[in-house]
Image (spheres, helix red, strand yellow):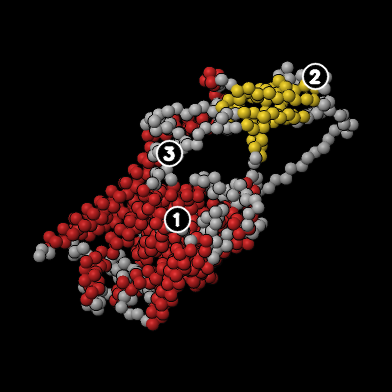
Amino acid sequence: MISKREEHLLSTLTETSGRFYRWIAVLLAVVLWGLYAYVHQLRHGLVVTGMRDEVSWGLYITNFVFFIGISHAGTLISAILRVTHTEWRRPITRLAEAITVFALCIGGPMVIIDLGRPERMLNLFRYGRIQSPILWDVLSVSTYLTGCILYLYIPMIPDFALLAEQSSLGAWRRRFYKKLSLGWTGSTTQWALLERAISVMAVVIIPLAISVHTVVSWIFAMTLRPGWNSSIFGPYFVVGAIYSGAAAVIFSMYVLRRVLRLQDYLEPVHFRNLGLLLLSFAMLYLYFNINEYLTMGYKFEGIEKEYLTRLFFGDYAPMFWTVQAVGVFIPALLLMAVLGLGRHQSFTIPGVALASFLAIVGAWAKRYLIVVPTLSSPFLPGQRIPWEWTHYRPTWVEWSITAAAVAVFLLIYALFSKLFPMVSVWETREPDAIPAEAEAAAPAPRGWGPISSIPIILITLTLAGASLAHAGETQKPRKPAPTALSLEWQALPADKLVSASPEEAPPDAITAGRVQHSLSQLFGQLHFGSKGGEEQKPPSAIALKATLKDERGAPVAMQAVSFSLRTSFGLVQYGSRPTNEEGKAELVVRDRRYGRYPVLVSYGGDEAFGGTRAEILVDFASRPTPALPTAGVLIAPYATAAIGLPFVIFYGIMWVVYLYAFGYLILWRMRRSGQEKHPH
């Protein structure tokens, strides 16, 4: 027997108004226009887009990161609420899990659309290297998509059996649901197997979801680009994904509640609880934003200075500050108003829905600001090249394909709502009805309600001013005595390199040794040399000797002189050394540089001696034959165990769990249980 509430829920599968068909027609028109734009791009190449050599990523990669992001909260929130046995989650799990699957189906192909030659995607599998973050991304997203499809399908099995028995549905639909039900009869054994499979999938989907967006962030963070070279990009992306994904779940709840009239299932308590969750992640996302930009802005130097200048005050400043306001501040203030103030509780549902919509729009724009400004601010600024080569402006082709991607997502979601119930029937059934008197007597929640934990981030920026005190008597300055510097160099033979002290060893060699030792503790003895075992050639060792004398030719002792190397892009500082009693300072330089470079030595001077400098041309070594590097720590010309083992083990375990939960528990044991109960 089904209740009145369930009858209304099932009626949404058969009752279709004219507005639904008009909505589908509009979405199909947008999709067809986007398909035309993509065919135009295939015929003429990426020249029809705004992407060029300098800015090679644009709207397509923005859409990829955005859709992968909103896919996380659906399954992640559903899985966490299932694991913690939160009862109010029951009406929202299916619509949240559907968002995850459909967003992944849209986000994944955006990478292929970004390619000018899509058929070359096969080269990733033919010549892919496990060291590449792009291959990590393919492995993680495909594993996650498979898990999310199973996690959506397995809890729907009892509802498929229920739909197969509904006479109000067409014959072809009943046969379709019967096939999907996998012989479900509702026996005690089948319920136990179903619950075990759901629990197993809920546990493994949580670390998998976190790993996926972490790997997506590594596509950016594993580069040396300004704005991307950050160690917090992993958690930064994960928090942003949950924030935007939770907003997508809330906004879809609001639309479905109004269109399908699901007020009996999607109650104000669901909007309130998810609104508190959204507010928590809004504050956490604000913390990560401040932490990301404050650490760069406080130093405000180097190539990141140009990047931050354009972002804070330049051509990207209007969009940047608008995104911060619309995507984070306004939703947080709106949620505080409708959830925290008693007189505004009547606006809880529309207020939370509006805040969610603003968060979704801000999340997409934020992804755009992550991708484009960094590519527009390279380490080596372009000179005497056309303006449009270094400034990205999306064309109608990119906007059309972006609109089509959103339309396809909405189209699949709308068709899904007409094929399957958007609320789980068996999960929302109540064994005992709650008395109306007890429900009416229950006091309405006021204030913030029973909040178990809300991560409130208090950010305090304290600026302290420093004053300079000028004390002492004013003395007439004395002209410092002139000095002279001479510089000579000598290439050290190989036998002297072995006896060099650890302090003189190159920094990269020290770092490589430490990393190798640490990873060897995890994976055993690892060899990071070349595949053939050949040792890496040590860097060239050059002894630089500077002599500092005064105008009479007497040595100047205990004075610091600085050594540096002049390149086409500026000076490379080697450090300073003090002069000895003979006025000499020596520095041994180990550099893998090849060719002849000018080396400078300078003395800044003091009150007694004036500053001076000298320059000499140093021949470091002859240029080697071009070839791939023969050694590496994590990145090498061959698959290293330090990269291969963690990925193979982690995602291999995920696939084994899929086989156990779906292959063994569902396809094997549950189907056999149904066949034994009803033998043919």
Residue at numbered disc 3: 637
Query: Which image quadrant: the C terminus?
Result: bottom left
Choose between 105 and 195: the one closer to the eye. 105
State if disc 3 and disc 2 touch (CB < 8 Å): no
Q: Return the x and y of residue 675 as percentages of the image width and height.
A: 14, 61
Of badges 1 and 2, nearer the viewer stands 2
Q: Is residue 16 above or below residue 370?
A: below
Spatial separation of the CA atoms under disc 1 and disc 2 = 78 Å
Using the image, tell me which numbered label, if any, was put on residue 553.
2
Residue drawn at the location 57% of the way across and 50% of the way down? 227
Mark 2 burial class by Cα count in 10 Å: few <14, some 14-19, many 20+:
few
Q: Earlier in the sequence, mark 2 or mark 3?
A: 2
Name which residue type carries label 3: Pro
Q: Earlier in the sequence, mark 3 or mark 1?
A: 1
- Callout 3: SS: loop
Mark 3 burial class by Cα count in 10 Å: few <14, some 14-19, many 20+:
some
Choose between 194 and 383: the one closer to the eye. 383
Residue at the left extreme of this rendering: 680
Q: Is residue 510 left or right of residue 20?
A: right
Name which residue type carries label 2: Gly
Choose between 39 and 177: the one closer to the eye. 39
Q: Return the x and y of residue 553 as percentages of the image width and height.
A: 80, 19
- Callout 1: SS: loop
Residue at numbered disc 1: 452
